[in-house]
Image (cartoon, rainbow, N blue to C red):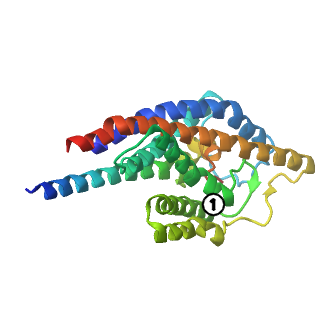
Amino acid sequence: MTQQTLEQTSLSAKSIQLLAAALLGFSIFAITALSPIEVIHNATHDTRHSAGFPCH
Amino acid sequence: MFFKNIVLAAFITAIVASIAYSAYQEVAVTPIILAAEEFEVPEVTGSETEETWSPENGLERRLFTFSADFLTAFSFSLMLISAMATQRKLTLLQGLGWGIAGYLCFFVAPALGLPPEIPGIETSSLVGRQLWWLIAVIFTAAGLWLVVFAKIPLKTVGIVILIAPHLLGAPNPETHAFANPDPVAVAQLTELWHQFILQTSIANALLWLIIGEIGAVFTRKWILSLDQHT
C-alpha cells in the first residue's frame, strides 16, 4: 500500500469509530431524554426537568 | 482503538461532571421541582387505570435521578468527545469552547423557544415540543459547526441554520398557564418557575463546562495521541 492509501484507510477507520461513539451517545441521550415509555419517564423525571428537556 | 478510548474517556468525564451537576441540582434545582409539585392538582382518572411504577419519594427517587444524570452526562460526553476528536489539535481553552458550544446546542438554543418547565405547567403536546426541541439542538450544532469551521460563504449558511428553528417558532401556547387555577398558587408557581429557569441555566452551564474541560484533557491524552501512531 502506498503511504497515501494507508493514510486514507486509517482516516476513514477513525471516522467510522468517531461516528459510532457519537451515535452511541445519541442513543443513550434519546432514551433518557425523550423516551415516551412511562416507566422510563418516571425514573428520569427530575433529570428531564433539570436539563430542560420537554417532559409532560 | 478510537472507539474504546472515547467510551472510556466519556465514562470518566461523565462521572466527574455528573457528581458536580447532581450536587448542584440537589441543593438548588430539585427543591424547586418538589415545591412546584405541592401545587399539583390530582388528575381525575377512572378506577380501572393502574398506577404505573414510579420511584418512591426520598432516597429511591434521588438515586434514579442521579443515575439518569450520569447517563445524560455520559451521552453528552460521548457526543462532545467524538466531535473534539475530529480536530488535529486541541488546547484546554478550546475544550472550554467546545463545552460552551454543547451548552448552546443542548440548553440555550432549545430553551429560547421552550424554557425549562416546572411540574404543573399546562402547555402544548409533548411530541410537538420534543420534535422542535430536537430540531433546535441539531440545527444549532450544524449551524455552529459551519460558522466556526467553514469558509466565509458557508458561514452565512451556518447563521441561517442557527436561526431557522426560531423563525419556525416553538410550539408554545400564547400564554403559559398552570394546572392549579388558584391565583395565590399561580403567583407562587410563577416565582418558582423564574427561579427554576435561572438555576437550571447555572446547573447546565456547570455540567457542560466540566464536560468540555475534562473531556478535552482525555481527548488530548487518549485520542489525539493515537493520530501520531497511525
Q: Which quadrant would the C terminus of chain B be assigned to in this image?
A: top left
Name above or below for residue B147 compared with residue A47.
below
Decide if residue B209 is on the left or right side of residue B118.
left
**Crowd class of label 1 (few under 14; some 14 to 19; many from 20; radius 10 Å):** some
Left or right: B176, with B86 as reference point: right
**At which x and y percent is residue B45?**
72, 54
The one nearer the camera, B178 or B89, is B89
Is residue A54 visible in this depiction of the protein? no
* Element marked by disc 1: helix
Q: Residue furthest top?
A: B59
Q: Is residue B166 above or below residue B112?
A: below
Residue at (75% x, 50% y) in the render? B120
Q: Position of residue B204 (x, y in %)?
A: 61, 42
For the image, the number of numbered tags is 1
Amino acid marked by disc 1: Leu
Q: Position of residue B109 (x, y in %)?
A: 61, 57
Q: Which residue is mark 1?
A: B126
